[in-house]
Image: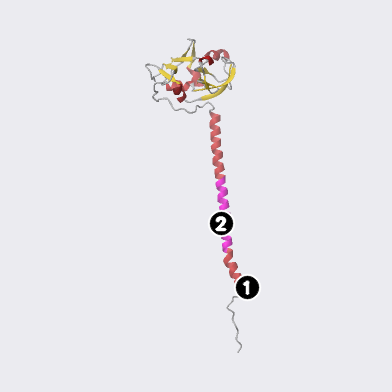
């Protein structure tokens, strides 16, 4: 009787078949994992770009909406105003808030605490130069002083006793600033300081005959009525 010898080594074709059957799923899984990682990375990048774009758009919109918004304010309407510790630059009366007797006296530190607005103007009234003036909005000065809503007039007086009445509506309707800096430097008396009213000259059609006299410099006091 013929004996058939069975080899213990599998047939080569069977080995390759089992190998393909075993390896193929691993390859598919690896490819799927790489594809999934790529998709996740792409989605994360898109989300980040969208977030940055939204933030940038919001900041741009805010800047465009209110270019005269003050920065750095730490003293707000309703806050108690401490007595000045430095040289008094401005005295305000007529409001409900006082810090020395019946006056609100403001030194440089207190004025700085009201926040700062800066813009460039053609200063034909005083220096004859194009300069950047900085200081708090007059509206913020009046608000911190507790000036009543029905107030109509700011009686302003300079160091040399020159005086001019300025409507409160100027401070409410325009970014009128109480300038304390010119081109980043404190203004001396010789340079029309230490404080002065500055009106915007760009983007506002202001009648010079009406507004020029209100550019009071060397301002010492404001009495609101």
**Considering depth in this image, is 153 or 17 the residue closer to the camera?**
17
| Residue at left offset 58%, top offset 54% | 35
Residue 24 is one of the magenta-drawn residues: no
- Label for residue 13? 1
Question: How many other residues sit within 10 Å of disc 2, few (<14), some (14-19) or many (≥20)?
Answer: few
Q: Quadrant of the N terminus?
A: bottom right
| Residue at left offset 57%, top offset 63% | 25
- At numbered mark 1, what does the secondary structure look like: helix, strand or loop? helix
Residues rendered magenta in the picture: 25-45
Which residue extends farthest left?
A: 101
Which residue extends farthest top?
A: 161
Q: Is residue 168 visible?
A: yes
- Residue 95 in the image, given as x and y percentages of width and height: 41, 18
- Label for residue 33? 2
Residue 37 is one of the magenta-drawn residues: yes
Q: Quadrant of residue 100?
A: top left
Q: Quadrant of residue 83?
A: top left
- Residue 31 in the image, given as x and y percentages of width and height: 59, 58
Q: Left of 23 or right of it: where is 84?
A: left
- Residue 51 in the image, given as x and y percentages of width and height: 54, 41
């Amino acid at each position: 009787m013929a004996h058939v010898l069975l080899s213990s080594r599998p047939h080569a074709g069977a080995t390759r078949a089992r190998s393909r059957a075993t390896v193929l799923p691993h390859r598919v899984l690896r490819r799927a994992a790489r594809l999934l990682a790529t998709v996740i990375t792409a989605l994360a990048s898109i989300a980040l770009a969208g977030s940055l774009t939204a933030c940038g758009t919001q900041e741009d919109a805010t800047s465009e909406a209110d270019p005269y918004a003050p920065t750095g304010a730490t003293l707000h309407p309703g806050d108690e105003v401490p007595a000045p510790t430095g040289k008094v630059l401005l005295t305000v009366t007529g409001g409900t808030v006082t810090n020395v007797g019946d006056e609100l006296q403001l030194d440089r530190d207190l004025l700085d605490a009201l926040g700062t607005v800066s813009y460039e103007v053609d200063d034909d009234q005083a220096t004859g130069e194009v300069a950047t003036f900085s200081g708090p909005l007059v509206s913020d000065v009046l608000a911190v002083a507790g000036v009543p809503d029905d107030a109509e007039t700011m009686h302003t007086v300079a160091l040399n006793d020159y005086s001019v009445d300025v409507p409160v509506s100027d401070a409410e309707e325009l970014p009128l600033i109480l300038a304390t800096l010119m081109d980043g430097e404190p203004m001396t008396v010789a340079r029309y300081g230490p404080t002065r009213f500055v009106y915007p000259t760009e983007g506002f059609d202001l009648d010079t005959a009406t507004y020029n006299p209100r550019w009071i410099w060397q301002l010492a006091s404001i009495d609101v009525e």
